[in-house]
Amino acid sequence: MKCIVDYYVKFGYTVNLGTLDISKAFIEMNHCGLFIKLMKKSVLVNLIRVLEIWFAVGTTCVKWCNFFSRLFALAAE
């Protein structure tokens, strides 16, 4: 992330970042209920599909520049 921010700042752009801790949502939430609520709120279907894939895949990692974290679970089994 730092590399990306540095790149845009170097060329005079303003960079805004946001984070969201959704770890509890993966563990404690009814996934189907979440998707239904998102659809009722008119969240883009493509974003809902991304979340659906994340739930199905089950693991991910963080990439920062050319470095990758170790894999970690998105949801408890």
Image (spheres, rainbow, N blue to C red):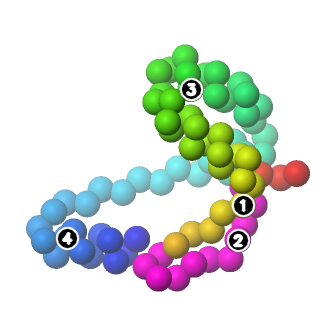
Q: Earlier in the sequence, mark 4 or mark 1?
A: 4
Compute the Cα span from label 4 to label 1.
Answer: 32 Å
Establish if 20 lies above or below 60. Answer: above
Asked whether disc 2 touches disc 3, contact meaning CB atoms under 8 Å apart, the reply is no
Establish if 11 lies above or below 21. Answer: below
Q: Secondary structure at mark 4?
A: helix
Q: Earlier in the sequence, mark 3 or mark 1?
A: 3
Compute the Cα span from label 1 to label 2.
Answer: 6 Å
Q: Earlier in the sequence, mark 2 or mark 3?
A: 3
Q: Which mark is residue 59?
A: 1
* Circle 4 residue: 9
The region drawn magenta spans 64-74
**Crowding at label 1, few (<14), some or many (≥20) Cα neighbours within 10 Å?**
few
Out of 69 and 49, give the one closest to the viewer: 49
The label nearer to you, 3 versus 1, is 1
Which quadrant of the rendered structure holds the N terminus?
A: bottom left
Compute the Cα span from label 4 to label 2.
Answer: 30 Å
Question: Who's the residue at 70% across and 71% down the image?
Answer: 71
Question: Who's the residue at 72% across and 53% down the image?
Answer: 57
* Circle 2 residue: 71
The three-letter amino acid code for the residue at tag 1 is: Thr
